[in-house]
Image: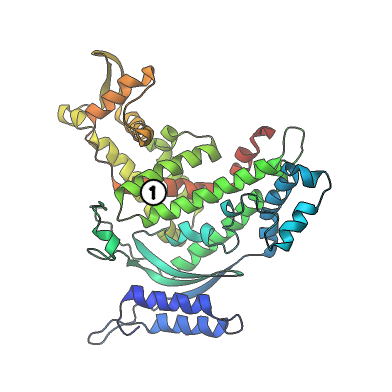
Amino acid sequence: MATKELVDAFNVLTLQTVLADQEQLPDIVGHVHGELLDFRFSGEAPEQVFPHAGVHVVRRRSELVHRIKMAGVLLRLEYDTQLTGGDLSGIKAAQDKGQLIFSSSEHLLNGATFLDVYVGPLMGAASPAIWNLHAAREFGIVVYSLGRFIVAPKDGAAEMLHFLPIRGSLESVPTPTIRPGACSTALDWWGAKLNNLFGVLTDPVTFTDQAGRYVPVKHLQAISTVEQLFKRITSLQAAHRDLTARRVLFFSVMDTLHRLTGRPIEKHCSLQFATETLERLRAAISAEAAEVLLPAAERAVTALRKVQDGFYLARQFGRDEIDVVNNGAATGKLNLEDAASEYLEMLRNATHGFGSNKSRHVGLTNTLLAHHDGDVPHDIGFLGYLYLLDLVSQPETLRGALYRGGRL
């Protein structure tokens, strides 16, 4: 605390909350909150840095873990022929050795234990700025809201690994001023929507076949997919220093969203669809909560619009479309919005290597490489966050996508 280095101070305050005995926790939380309110930088007449700091608890009920765990338990019952036949010797032997008995995909769906996975994208909503500290406890998450955005990255290397030749963002990101109550309002919105989301994810009826029979593996796959989405969005938000890592995570997120929504990447990378999604969220989220929740989503839509500017040949010739050429002959035209969507899909496919082994795509792929300068804004990755917000805001739509008409 004496160094007045925010990262050091925040480490101490978070550790105090994580390590406190349960009986001492209220006092420790009060102490940490007081430290945040009193925090000042050195200088003449220093002012409070966090005069609107607050404390919040996102509580996790034990029933949530039980309902998620149920899928893994029933999956072992289905695939363990010895247990299905009534022979308990294998379970007893494992229990005698202190081993977990029901561990089917245990570590693919443990995010609900502390809720940290599911609040991660909210915590990183202002990336590369931060607006909170959080500490995981056995009952859920203690969140200290700062009441403002603080620029998180340091100039230059912050640790030895940053001396590796990795390129980070070269784009300046504005740090908006938010109202004192914006953090609390955003937390309330997220908590309510997360509660509804878990209502869908833990409802056995959602994961039945066409005969109405519950299918544990269908349930487990859905929960694991949703948890994967939350984890990768948070990693994407944290990858401000690494263009390549964020880009790969972005494409992975797009694939996961395709699985959950049925919408392919070219749809999610359509400027019209992204703009419509953003407008729907603006209408659904209060203005105060939107100050925390929406800036990154707005930057994503702006970035998608800028991808069109990379078609330098069209720009030089004053055109709003490009000619698709295959073997020297024009085979069609693409307006710049569609071309930008196709270009991002081409980059996604290039995670396996550039070029196409599908004859019908060769001309399009080569045309896109010729027409675009390859400069894609770093903020394009936040398209994934935009669609996560949309998914969280209307979980009943997700229910239909996960049920899939009873298909397995």
The residue depicted at 39 percent of the width and 20 percent of the height is 358
Where residue 41 sits: x, y (%)? 28, 81
In the rendered structure, the answer to whether residue 42 lies left or right of residue 301 reads left
Pick the residue in front: 320 or 242. 242
Q: Which residue is mark 1?
A: 382
Q: Is residue 226 above or below residue 129?
A: above
Dot 1 lies on which element?
helix
Q: Quadrant of the C terminus?
A: top right
In the rendered structure, the answer to whether residue 301 lies left or right of residue 196 reads left
Q: Is residue 52 above or below residue 117?
A: below
Q: Quadrant of the N terminus?
A: bottom left
The residue depicted at 49 percent of the width and 48 percent of the height is 388
Pick the residue in front: 336 or 290. 336
In the rendered structure, the answer to whether residue 320 lies left or right of residue 150 reads left
Q: How is the image coloured?
A: rainbow
Where residue 125 sits: x, y (%)? 42, 58
Q: Is residue 36 above or below residue 247?
A: below
Pick the residue in front: 300 or 52. 300
Query: Which residue occupies the extreme left position in the image?
Result: 316
